[in-house]
């Protein structure tokens, strides 16, 4: 198999043929005087799941939040270098951040349904973007819940509180809420860390299905999960001054079986981290 090909669901995916969806070039992130990320450069393909792995504190979540400018919400945060979505600089003053976050949605570590009905959780985003027709909202809600593999479980509970669902269902509800505004990219920050093994496998199956239509970037501490679900993987470490750096990036199969950097091998085999 060509080194740029990876096996996904028994089909060969040529990463070299995939368009670059997101790109960073020598990106550094600061929180006040503290440097959280240093000189991060990577191209994220449009037709794949990318996993970001590394020990705690190395800047994985900070890197993830660069892609929809969530770090802007942290006082004193500033970014140097380039971050592009489809070749457009997203830190340009001309960028509409609300529109950016519509295109680049985010699922957080802990399920966070709004304290409202299942229906209103999904309809919330479309309403904020000007859709108020009930029939149209009903169509969006059903489509989003089907895409999140949740429709059959909640179709008779749409008026019940989203908080009444199980943890795994709540996380899929949050994924459906992101899908309702038709994003192009889905960011997932340790989406299974609070879930049991059965719910985790459902989320992983869902990610693989969603990757047929969306670009997905996942931060995970679970090496087995990264190996199971991702097509490309980025390994990060923390330097002596605690700045996160990118050590190695490439096809997941290569990174896990034939890493180029000794530090990557040491981390994956459990020698540190």
Image: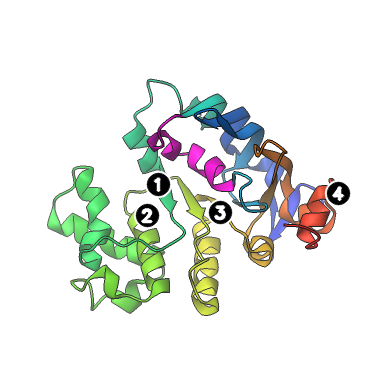
Please name whichever residue, 95 or 135, is drawn nearer the observer in this view of the structure: 95
Residue 193 is left or right of residue 273, and the answer is left
Give the mark nearest the N terminus, 3 or 4: 3
Give the mark nearest the N terminus, 1 or 4: 1
Whether residue 24 is in magenta: the answer is no
Cα gap from disc 1 to disc 3, whole angstroms: 15 Å
Give the mark nearest the N terminus, 1 or 3: 1
Q: Is residue 166 above or below residue 203?
A: below
Q: Position of residue 172 (x, y in %)?
A: 40, 66
Give the quarter of the image for residue 174: bottom left
Dot 2: element: helix
Cα gap from disc 4 to disc 2, whole angstroms: 39 Å
Q: Is there CB contact under 8 Å for labels 1 and 4?
A: no
Q: Is there CB contact under 8 Å for labels 2 and 1?
A: yes
Dot 1: element: loop
Looking at the rendered image, the disc whose residue lies closer to the viewer, 3 or 2, is 3
Q: Which residue is mark 4?
A: 262
Q: Which residue is mark 2?
A: 179
Cα gap from disc 1 to disc 4, whole angstroms: 37 Å
Dot 4: element: helix
Q: Residue at x 64, y 57 (%)?
A: 230
Q: Residue at x 82, y 55 (%)?
A: 266
Q: Which residues are magenta?
A: 60-76
Q: Position of residue 3 (x, y in %)?
A: 81, 48
Q: Which quadrant of the figure contains the C terminus? A: bottom right
Looking at the rendered image, the disc whose residue lies closer to the viewer, 1 or 4, is 4
Give the mark nearest the N terminus, 4 or 2: 2
Q: Residue at x 81, y 49 (%)?
A: 263
Q: Which residue is mark 1?
A: 183
Label ID, residue 157: none
Q: Which residue is mark 3?
A: 218
């Amino acid at each position: 198999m060509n080194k740029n090909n990876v096996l996904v669901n028994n089909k060969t995916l040529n990463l070299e043929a995939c368009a670059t969806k997101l790109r960073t070039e020598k990106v550094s992130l600061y929180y006040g005087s503290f440097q959280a990320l240093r000189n991060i450069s990577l191209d994220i393909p449009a037709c794949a799941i990318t996993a970001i792995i590394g020990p705690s504190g190395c800047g994985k979540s900070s890197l993830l939040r660069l892609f929809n400018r969530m770090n802007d919400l942290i006082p004193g945060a500033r970014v140097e270098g380039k971050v592009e979505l489809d070749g457009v600089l997203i830190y340009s003053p001309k960028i509409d951040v609300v529109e950016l976050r519509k295109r680049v949605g985010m699922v957080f570590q802990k399920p966070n349904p709004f304290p409202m009905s299942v229906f209103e959780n999904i309809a919330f985003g479309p309403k904020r973007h000007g859709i108020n027709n009930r029939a149209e909202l009903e169509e969006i809600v059903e489509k989003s819940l089907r895409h999140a593999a949740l429709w059959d479980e909640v179709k008779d509970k749409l008026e019940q509180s989203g908080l009444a669902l199980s943890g795994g269902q709540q996380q899929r509800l949050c994924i459906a809420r992101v899908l309702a505004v038709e994003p192009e990219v889905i960011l997932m920050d340790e989406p299974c860390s609070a879930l049991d093994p059965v719910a985790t496998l459902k989320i992983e199956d869902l990610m693989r299905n969603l990757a047929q239509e969306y670009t997905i970037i996942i931060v995970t501490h679970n090496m087995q999960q990264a190996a199971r679900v991702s097509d490309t993987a980025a390994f990060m470490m923390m330097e002596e001054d605690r700045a996160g750096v990118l050590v190695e990036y490439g096809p997941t199969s290569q990174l896990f079986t034939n890493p180029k950097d000794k530090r990557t091998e040491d981390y994956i085999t459990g020698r540190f981290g």
